[in-house]
Image: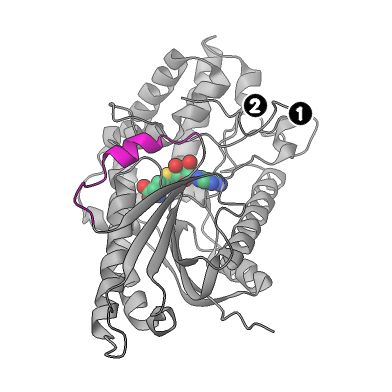
Amino acid sequence: MSDSSLMNGENGLKKVTSLLPTNGGNGSYSYFKNSYYQRISAIFEHKKISEEIAEKFDVEDLSLSKAIRIADLGCATGPNTIMNMLNIVEAIKQKYEANKCPAIPSTRPEFQLFFNDLVTNDFNTLFKSLPEDRDYFVAGVPGSFLDRIFPESSLHFVYTSHSLHWLFKLPAELEEENSPAWNKGRVHYTNAPDDVADAYKSQFCEEVRKFLDARAKELVGGGMLVIIMSGTPVDLPLSSTANGKMFEFMASTLMEMVREGLIKESQVDSFNLPLYQSASPEEIVDIVERNGCFSIERLELSKPSSWLKGAAVDVPAWMMHARAAMEGNFIKHFGSNEVVDEVFKRLTKKHLDHSELLPQWCNQDVQLFIVLKRKKIISM
Ligand code: SAH
């Protein structure tokens, strides 16, 4: 696991807590091998994306463009990103076929796919897994998607799944022991005092604001932005969702380990996971409207767990997924692989002990599906 010093702290600047990438490679704890749940919850939205493209992707405006440029922001190491990008490519190809224009000799566009993630992401694993006989061009774009990472008006379609609910930075108040947002004995804002939840919320709003500002510059007029991320109805407490319960169990597991002398209490108090998982549709509408450059084409909350269709949750597999996505944060903070092994072993047991409640915790509207369109840019 790489450290985050490339992004901060090296030049005598104030050190901020930065996000760490998902587990690289393709070993047992890798994201590559443990991202099946993210995969099926993205597939859950594929048909809707194709419908939106068929209805609203403005191919007439784009027909003189030599290549359609599509970016996946927060692509991780694969394999989900490739499948998600190809779903978009396929839908655009079909749209082109349906709109064939005799005046233009070659109506078949070329495609250029950009894969973005943090500089510390394991891009090699992703690039090695790309099919050799592909009919599209690819490029990696390292860097935070909260900033500009593409030239102005250069993208036609931007996609991002399960990435925007990660906070790039933890709110500074969480790291100050005397602050009302000092999150004693917890690892997240689930069940925390309002000061903690408010600090997370304002950091999230600030990051989404930056994200939209950057995309507004990079997308062409009529270009589309599809976001899949965690969310909840405004009145649903996170503690009644599967993720909220997991954060509660993480905190109680760590506190057990404090009592057994395996870690220090101060280490738990200063540990917070950089995830905001309760964005409500109303909150998103507010941020998009303040930005002013996008129209909201579709905004839905849904139950990604409907794929379970009554089947039992595979707890060990789910815990491996959580570990593949977040263990870097644990290792960096607690400094030992053994501690992380112990945390996830106990966490798995705690979930198994509550398995009769899991279907209820999973059966909630916790996935946001957002389709935005860049308003036409009127040149003076
Ligand atoms: N989209 C993939 C991966 C989701 S995991 C999928 O659906 O399977 C979340 C990814 O988002 C991680 O790889 C993380 O590094 C990336 N990410 C989070 N915040 C980011 C940021 N500000 N800039 C770039 N990548 C980011």
Looking at the rendered image, the quarter that the C terminus falls into is: bottom right
| 129 in the magenta segment | yes
Instruction: Say which mark, if any, is on residue 269.
Output: 2
Residue labelled 2 has its Cβ within 8 Å of some atom of ligand 1 = no
- Mark 1 to mark 2: distance in Å? 9 Å
Disc 2 crowd rating (10 Å Cα; few below 14, some 14-19, many 20+) is: many
Does dot 2 land on a helix, a strand or a loop? Answer: helix
| Quadrant of the rendered image containing residue 12 | top right
Q: In the picture shown, does residue 210 fall above or below 90?
A: above
Q: Confirm whether residue 361 shows in the render.
A: no
Residue at which label 1 appears: 177
- Picture residue at 64% right of the left edge, 63% below the top: 213
Q: Amino acid at mark 1?
A: Glu
Q: Are marks 1 and 2 in contact (CB under 8 Å)?
A: yes
Q: Position of residue 342 (x, y in %)?
A: 41, 18
Residue pictured at 43% horizontal, 22% vertical: 343
Q: How is the image coloured?
A: one colour
Crowding at label 1, few (<14), some or many (≥20) Cα neighbours within 10 Å? some
| Numbered disc total | 2
Q: Is residue 42 above or below residue 191?
A: below
Q: Amino acid at mark 2?
A: Asp
In the rendered image, residue 186, in percent from the top left (x then y), is placed at: 59, 32
Q: Nearer the viewer, residue 300 or 195?
A: 300
Q: x and y percent of residue 159 in the render?
A: 43, 60
Vertical side of 50 occupied by 252: above or below:
above
Q: Is residue 90 magenta?
A: no
Highlighted magenta segment, given as a residue range: 120-134
Residue occupying image coordinates x 49% and y 14%: 336
Asked if residue 14 lies left or right of residue 254, the reply is: right
- Numbered disc 1: secondary structure: loop
Mark 1 or mark 2: name the one nearer the start of the chain: 1
